[in-house]
Image (spheres, grey):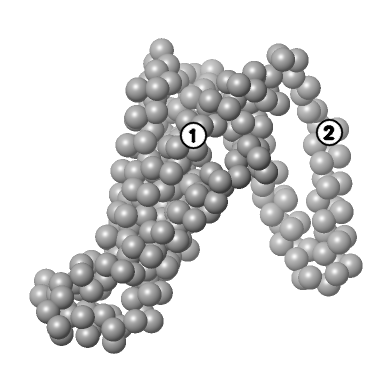
């Protein structure tokens, strides 16, 4: 199980043939996606090659400051992307997103590293960086889905919210149904994935470990770990980001301002 078939430069060049076929199919069907596919392919290729070399160096250095620096960059990018997906113009949204992603990811990651995986050093990049990357990415998606859904609901249901307020409801009560729906929406992709994992889809961590030579049973254990951690992280991130967003639409007197 430990024989790894490494991919060399020739193999990576052949991988471009896959994208070439996709571009040709897009052109044939006149989908207008050829440029986006090509741009996405070049960008992902460059990013993944770069991160491969960078993490190789980080693994060799094995210093907690360097590891935390990498995690900080990853968190910053995830926060910017999530903020932009929700609303680029809403003032003060970025700190809310950063704190939501940081708190949710730190809690889940701390639980996983300190109580379950328990590496010799808590900052071992072999474990901390891949696990953090998966949690950051999923928290980013969950927070952006929840934030965007709540923001849209507030804008579309202003009169209904004001009616609740006029009847004596607090801002929290007036917004509660929309917040719950936004949180549920953010968890739908993750919950759907849990229903078919192992039966229809083989997730990235499981596949990566098996291709890397790990025993499938060990790979399944790690996939269970990260899948459960993703659920918790997404839920916390969605709750925190929706709490931060809705409060920006009410003043101290529970009046809707927008």
Taking the image as drawn, is residue 63 in sight?
A: no
Task: Report crowding for label 2: few under 14, some 14 to 19, many 20 or more residues within 10 A (C-alpha).
Answer: few
Secondary structure category for the residue under label 2? helix
Q: Nearer the viewer, residue 114 or 181?
A: 181
Q: Residue at x 75, y 15 (%)?
A: 3
Does label 2 or label 1 sit earlier along the sequence? 2
Nearest the viewer among 251 and 202 is 202
**Vertical side of 35 occupied by 100: above or below:** above
Q: Classify mark 1: residues with Cα within 10 Å, few (<14), some (14-19) or many (20+).
A: many
Residue 76 horizontal/vertical position (percent): 42, 47
Quadrant containing the N terminus in the rendered view: top right
When asked about the image quadrant of residue 111, the answer is top left
Q: Quadrant of residue 204?
A: top right
Q: Secondary structure at mark 1?
A: helix
Which residue was labeled with disc 2? Answer: 11
**In the rendered image of this protein, does residue 107 appear above or below residue 173?**
above
Which residue sits at x=53%, y=25%? 221
| Percent of width and height locating residue 98 | 35, 51
């Amino acid at each position: 199980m430990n024989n790894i078939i490494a991919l060399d430069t020739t193999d990576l060049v052949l991988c471009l043939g896959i994208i070439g076929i996709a571009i040709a199919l897009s052109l044939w069907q006149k989908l207008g996606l050829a440029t986006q596919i090509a741009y996405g392919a070049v960008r992902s290729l460059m990013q993944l090659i770069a991160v491969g070399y960078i993490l190789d160096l980080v693994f060799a250095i094995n210093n907690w400051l360097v590891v935390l620096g990498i995690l900080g960059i990853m968190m910053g990018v995830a926060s910017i992307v999530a903020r932009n997906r929700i609303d680029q113009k809403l003032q003060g949204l970025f700190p809310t997103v950063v704190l939501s992603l940081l708190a949710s990811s730190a809690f889940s990651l701390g639980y996983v590293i300190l109580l379950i995986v328990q590496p010799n050093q808590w900052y071992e990049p072999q474990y901390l960086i891949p696990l953090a990357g998966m949690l950051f990415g999923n928290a980013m998606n969950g927070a952006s889905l929840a934030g965007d859904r709540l923001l849209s609901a507030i804008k579309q249901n202003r009169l209904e919210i004001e009616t609740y307020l006029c009847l004596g409801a607090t801002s929290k009560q007036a917004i509660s149904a929309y917040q719950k729906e936004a949180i549920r929406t953010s968890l739908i992709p993750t919950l759907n994935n849990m229903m078919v994992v192992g039966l229809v889809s083989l997730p990235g961590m499981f596949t990566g470990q098996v291709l890397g030579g790990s025993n499938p049973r060990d790979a399944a254990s790690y996939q269970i770990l990260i899948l459960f951690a993703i659920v918790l992280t997404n839920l916390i991130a969605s709750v925190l980001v929706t709490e931060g967003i809705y409060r920006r639409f009410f003043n101290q007197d529970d009046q809707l301002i927008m």
